[in-house]
Image: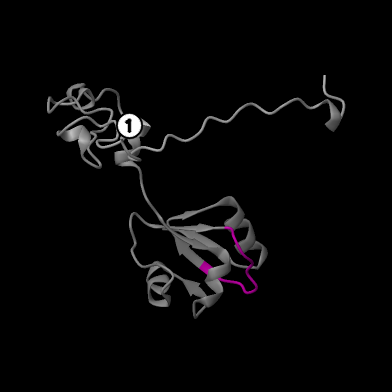
Amino acid sequence: MVTGLHDLGQPAPRRRRRRVGRGPGSGRGKTSGRGQKGQGARSGGTKGSAFEGGQSPFVSRVPIRGFNNKRFASEYAIVNVGDLARVEGDTITPEALMEAGLVKKMKDGIKILGDGELERALLVKAHRFSKEAQRKIEAAGGRIEVI
């Protein structure tokens, strides 16, 4: 049990780094342990761990199993409540968001998220609203309309 610095033992010995290519007397001179010619003698001359000599890799041979819903998931363009103040007018539509530069691509629709604050009452038309966004819009005296 170590109670203080005076009780510490000797540190574990450190293995010295192998210095290859330092002459014939080192035992690792000339070809530096890489043998003669061939792929292994070249720099970068290794294949990945999954390489099977040109045979079709195991990962490719095994069929894909199961179902993943990711392919069919909806992807929404996201706008935060705090960014709605940058849009002119009292009615905010997807077209108005595109004109203001808040949305570049419509994707599957627009979702309003609750980050930021809203000072004025707005009518916001979008495809989805988070609960926090809905609460903040209605607290500022506005309304939401799901398209």
Residue closer to the observer: 26 or 138: 26
The image shows residue 134 at horizontal and vertical percentages of 58, 57
Range of magenta residues: 114-123
The C terminus appears in which quarter of the rendering?
bottom left
Could you say which is closer to the camera, residue 63 or residue 39?
39
| 66 to 40, vertically: above or below | above
Q: Which residue is mark 1?
A: 68
Q: Is residue 2 left or right of residue 122?
A: right
Dividing the picture into quadrants, the one containing residue 59 is: top left
In the picture as drawn, the residue positioned furthest to the bottom comes out as 88
Rendering coords of residue 56 (x, y %): 14, 26
| Neighbours of disc 1 within 10 Å: few (<14), some (14-19), many (20+) | few
The x and y percentages for residue 122 are: 56, 71
Look at the image and say whether residue 120 sits in the magenta stretch.
Answer: yes
Look at 53% across and 61% down and name the residue there: 144
Q: Quadrant of the N terminus?
A: top right
The amino acid type found where label 1 is placed reads Asn
Q: Residue furthest front?
A: 25
